[in-house]
Image (spheres, rainbow, N blue to C red):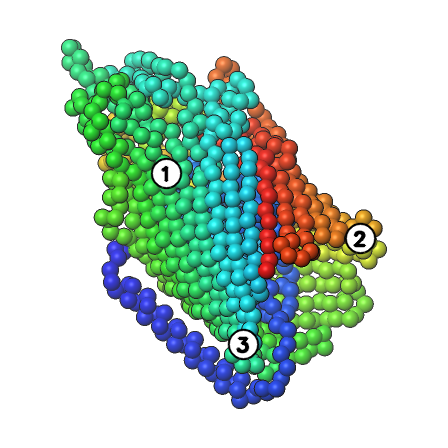
């Protein structure tokens, strides 16, 4: 449920925070009294046991689960300048591997955050939230976005990342919602002593970027503190800057998108209608053009961030850790000169109404200037944690966290209502736009799609962990905790005059979640023939949502070591993912696509059994946004695998992990161009609508009067309802595998690595269609990453290969000459990266100096051709060959 903003919810929000803070203080005070009463001030300090992602019990590995780790050295060697760049080295991160790791400007008003998708879960890109949980130091942080509500991984700069831990099983039994595909935890540095300055510069074809950071810290008696400042800036890449993204015909490799009508010297008269019936199709006039050539393929972006950490031992048994961050990002993209398609109405001498539809560009008018789209966000957060060590190894950890974000976007547009009025009044002649008065054009173009969101997250968590009792096979350990979270979102968005968003009220929604969770680790057998170790773990979490009721999610894991060098693991669990607050607030929105129906929907209409005259009905009306009565997504997951380090091959490690996910009530919307969608979601298509049906659809949206101004239903092929719902379920089965070998020789230390993810099965069906479809169609079945590294003395070198195989496709565009598909497969894609680094050990300026050279996509491989109307004409993504040099100096 969402409401208009009023002072009362905000007051309640801070009241709840105060109550929880006081409660946490009472619990901590109780723990302190215990520590003072029973502690011995002369006890020596001991090395701290860390808590690994996937468990709340200190000093153990998660039982029954696969853990993937990325070290600080891995980050350095990768040349990553963002957290998503780091994740892009993982074959399991399906959307980032050999893909785009930054904001893609094809749908900037819909997508402001790049989210990792472990396990390639379906409909991921169409939902506002995430089904892979992203944590920072083991806890949630505030999401960002206007039509999204997801954590921006890139707000954590690589300079402060100590390691990244990934659990590829569902993690809702410990962490709550969102952990369907897995958990990614960015663990930041605990301390830092000294000053470190780092700077890097990258250069590619029509592209540059740079990044700088300075980290300073110190240690003192029983404590330490550091602060890190980071800044990065990146140039834009236009569509015309890469041959593989150019538009044109289907004739050559350099022309890989369908040709479009004349854009700069405007006039495309597409059809003429008499009393609603098509009698002529005049076609496009002027030369063909590539609208994508001046659009940003990669947007320009600058980002600044601050991160700090302070640790202080208050007594022998009490310590306080405080970490905080601030991050801001500004992303801009170029768009092709704006144009419109407009219907003009004339009455002939015979009294017959004539309705010509004219497409044109505003560029020839002197008052026109090329616009830029923009999305920005800033976020900050603070996380104090008090740890109290009790007798018998138990610890109480009390964490408070507060963070907030401010996100907005602005997409230049034209005012369709004013345009229609000017055309009907004869003020604008769409066939001679240059003749229109400047103030009229400025009035029409003083328009934008704009949105802003303010999001807040407060969380309080108390966890106690330690050994309950000693069993013959080891300690039976337990962690138990309680958690309270309060999240608020305030959103305003609309089509408005430029800068007019500030005059609108916010819509708001809030959610509180009360949680309790527990985890047990039970060592069953150890030191027996064939059972070197057998450990069972069980965990469960109960969450009570203020808006979606309650849920309990269990998890069971088992790890068996028949011998010291072989570990076999298995786990089963359930996961839960609630709709975001953005989904709660979201409104139904109207969209209109002129002249595209025959190009994109011919196969779709045929699959639906419809015969449409696309010459008479060339246009498409769509509904976007959120439906009412959205429900949580749920999943049941299980996995089994092994890790082997055979003694006959010292330095060798082999891993494999089979997994299965049953995913139900999936949130998202479908691709309306797919012929499969016409069967799966038949009720979402209203073919050849009447005016009454179009008006009824418009009434369900907040902007229908504007978006569909002057639209005659007789020119619309279909109304497509693409609003968010829980319409699907999926079954995903796959295999992770890894091979690592480390070998010492007189020439140095060599390391070899091979890892991958194979999709054995991924099928989806809608509740309505009730028919399974293979979701692996038109996509690669596996991802492979291999690497060869070498280290000797102060030198370090590594070559990495990221491989996406060839795959069959059945949705390629057809050849206009014969109607046959233009391709039946997409070629393989191999990207090779090189790293060379040297650490100086001299004195003076070269002391503690490191130089690094990275070559991304060494052989300048292009993404393979994938000819699909209305979509990107390539599969995968690369910036091209980019050479980078960076230096780090420590004092």
Which is more toward the observer, 506 or 346? Answer: 506
Q: What element carries label 3?
A: strand
In primary-sequence order, the first of circles 1 and 3 is 3
Rendered view: 871 above or below 118: above
Dividing the picture into quarters, in which one does residue 466 lie?
Answer: bottom right
Residue 744's mark? 2
In primary-sequence order, the first of circles 2 and 3 is 3
The residue lying furthest to the top in this view is 349
Dividing the picture into quarters, in which one does residue 686 lie?
Answer: top left
Q: How crowded is mark 3: few (under 14 residues within 10 Å), some or many (20 or more)?
A: some
Q: Quadrant of the N terminus?
A: bottom left
Please indicate whether residue 186 sits to the left or right of residue 145 in the image. right
Percent position (x, y) of residue 852? Answer: 63, 47
* Separation (CA) of disc 2 from disc 3: 41 Å
Percent position (x, y) of residue 440? Answer: 20, 28
Residue on which disc 3 sits: 313
Question: CB under 8 Å between callouts 2 and 1?
Answer: no
Q: In which quarter of the image is the C terminus?
A: bottom right
The count of marks equals 3
Residue on which disc 1 sits: 373
Would residue 725 be seen by someone viewing this image from the given angle? no
Q: Residue at x 47, y 24 (%)?
A: 247
């Amino acid at each position: 449920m969402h409401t208009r903003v009023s002072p009362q919810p905000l007051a309640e929000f801070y009241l709840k925070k105060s109550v929880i803070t006081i409660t946490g203080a009472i619990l901590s005070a109780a723990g302190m009294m215990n520590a003072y009463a029973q502690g011995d001030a002369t006890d020596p300090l001991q090395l701290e046991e860390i808590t690994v992602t996937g468990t709340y019990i200190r000093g153990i590995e998660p039982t029954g689960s696969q853990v993937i780790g990325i070290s600080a050295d891995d980050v350095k060697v990768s040349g990553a300048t963002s957290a998503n760049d780091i994740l892009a080295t993982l074959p399991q991160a399906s959307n980032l591997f050999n893909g785009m790791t930054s904001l893609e400007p094809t749908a900037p008003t819909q997508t402001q955050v790049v989210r990792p998708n472990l396990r390639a879960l379906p409909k991921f890109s169409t939902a506002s939230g995430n089904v892979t949980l992203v944590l920072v130091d083991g806890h949630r942080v505030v999401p960002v976005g206007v039509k999204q509500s997801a954590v921006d991984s890139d707000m954590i700069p690589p300079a402060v990342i100590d390691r990244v831990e990934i659990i590829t099983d569902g993690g809702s039994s410990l962490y709550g919602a969102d952990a369907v595909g897995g958990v990614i935890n960015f663990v930041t540095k605990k301390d830092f002593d000294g000053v470190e300055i780092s700077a890097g510069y990258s250069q590619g074809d029509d592209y540059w970027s740079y990044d700088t950071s300075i980290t300073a810290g110190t240690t003192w008696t029983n404590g330490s503190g550091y602060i890190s400042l980071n800044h990065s800036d990146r140039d834009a890449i236009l569509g015309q800057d890469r041959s593989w993204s150019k538009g044109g015909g289907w004739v050559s490799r350099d022309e890989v998108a369908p040709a479009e009508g004349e854009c700069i010297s405007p006039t495309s008269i597409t059809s003429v209608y008499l009393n609603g019936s098509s009698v002529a199709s005049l076609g496009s006039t002027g030369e063909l053009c590539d609208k994508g050539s001046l659009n940003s393929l990669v947007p320009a972006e600058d980002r600044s961030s601050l991160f700090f950490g302070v640790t202080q031992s208050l007594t022998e048994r009490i310590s306080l850790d405080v970490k905080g961050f601030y991050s801001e990002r500004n992303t801009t993209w170029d768009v092709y000169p704006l144009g419109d398609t407009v219907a003009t109405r004339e009455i002939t001498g015979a009294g017959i109404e004539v309705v010509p539809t004219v497409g044109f560009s505003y560029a020839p008018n002197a008052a026109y200037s090329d616009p830029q789209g923009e999305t920005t966000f800033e976020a900050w957060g603070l996380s104090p944690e008090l740890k109290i060590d009790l007798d018998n190894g138990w610890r109480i950890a009390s964490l408070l966290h507060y963070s907030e974000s401010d996100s907005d976007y602005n997409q230049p547009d034209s005012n369709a209502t004013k345009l229609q009025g000017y055309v009907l009044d004869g003020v604008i002649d769409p066939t001679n736009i240059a003749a229109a008065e400047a103030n009229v054009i400025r009035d029409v173009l003083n328009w934008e799609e704009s949105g802003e969101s303010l999001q807040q997250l407060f969380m309080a968590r108390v966890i106690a962990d330690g050994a309950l009792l000693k069993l013959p096979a080891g300690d039976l350990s337990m962690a138990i905790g309680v958690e309270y979270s309060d999240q608020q979102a305030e959103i305003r968005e609309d089509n408005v005059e430029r800068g007019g968003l500030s005059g609108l009220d916010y819509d708001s929604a809030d959610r509180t979640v009360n949680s309790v969770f527990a985890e047990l680790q039970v060592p069953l057998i150890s030191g027996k023939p064939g059972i070197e170790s057998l450990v069972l773990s069980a965990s469960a979490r109960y969450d009570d949502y203020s808006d979606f009721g309650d849920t309990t999610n269990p998890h069971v894991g088992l790890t068996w070591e028949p011998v010291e060098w072989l570990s076999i693991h298995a786990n089963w669990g359930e996961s839960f993912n609630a709709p975001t607050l953005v989904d709660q607030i979201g409104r139904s929105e109207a969209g209109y696509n002129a002249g595209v129906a025959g190009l994109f929907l011919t196969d779709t209409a045929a699959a639906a059994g419809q015969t449409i005259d696309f010459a008479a009905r060339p246009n498409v009306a769509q509904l976007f946004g959120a439906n009412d009565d959205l429900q949580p997504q749920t999943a049941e997951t299980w996995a089994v695998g092994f890790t082997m380090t055979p003694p006959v091959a010292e330095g060798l490690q082999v891993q494999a992990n089979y997994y299965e996910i049953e995913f139900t009530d999936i949130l998202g919307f479908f691709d309306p161009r797919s012929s499969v969608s016409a069967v799966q979601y038949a009720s979402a298509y209203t073919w050849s609508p009447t005016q009454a049906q179009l008006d009824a659809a418009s009434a369900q949206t907040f902007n229908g009067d504007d978006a569909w101004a002057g639209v005659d239903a007789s020119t619309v092929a279909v109304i497509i309802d693409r609003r968010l719902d829980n319409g699907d379920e999926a079954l995903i089965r796959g295999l992770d595998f890894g091979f690592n070998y480390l070998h010492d020789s007189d020439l140095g230390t060599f390391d070899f690595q091979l890892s991958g993810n194979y999709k054995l099965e991924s099928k989806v069906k809608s509740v309505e269609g009730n028919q399974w479809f293979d979701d692996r169609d038109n996509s690669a079945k596996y991802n492979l990453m291999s690497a060869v590294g070498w280290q000797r003395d102060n030198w370090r070198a590594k070559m990495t290969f990221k491989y996406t195989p060839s795959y069959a496709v059945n949705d390629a565009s057809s050849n206009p000459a014969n109607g046959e598909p233009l391709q039946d497969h997409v070629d393989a894609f191999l990207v090779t990266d090189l790293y060379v680094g040297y650490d100086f050990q001299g004195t003076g300026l070269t002391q503690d100096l490191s130089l690094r050279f990275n070559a991304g996509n060494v052989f300048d491989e292009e993404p393979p051709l994938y000819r699909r109307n209305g979509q990107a004409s390539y599969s995968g993504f690369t910036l091209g060959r980019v050479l980078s040099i960076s230096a780090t100096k420590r004092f």
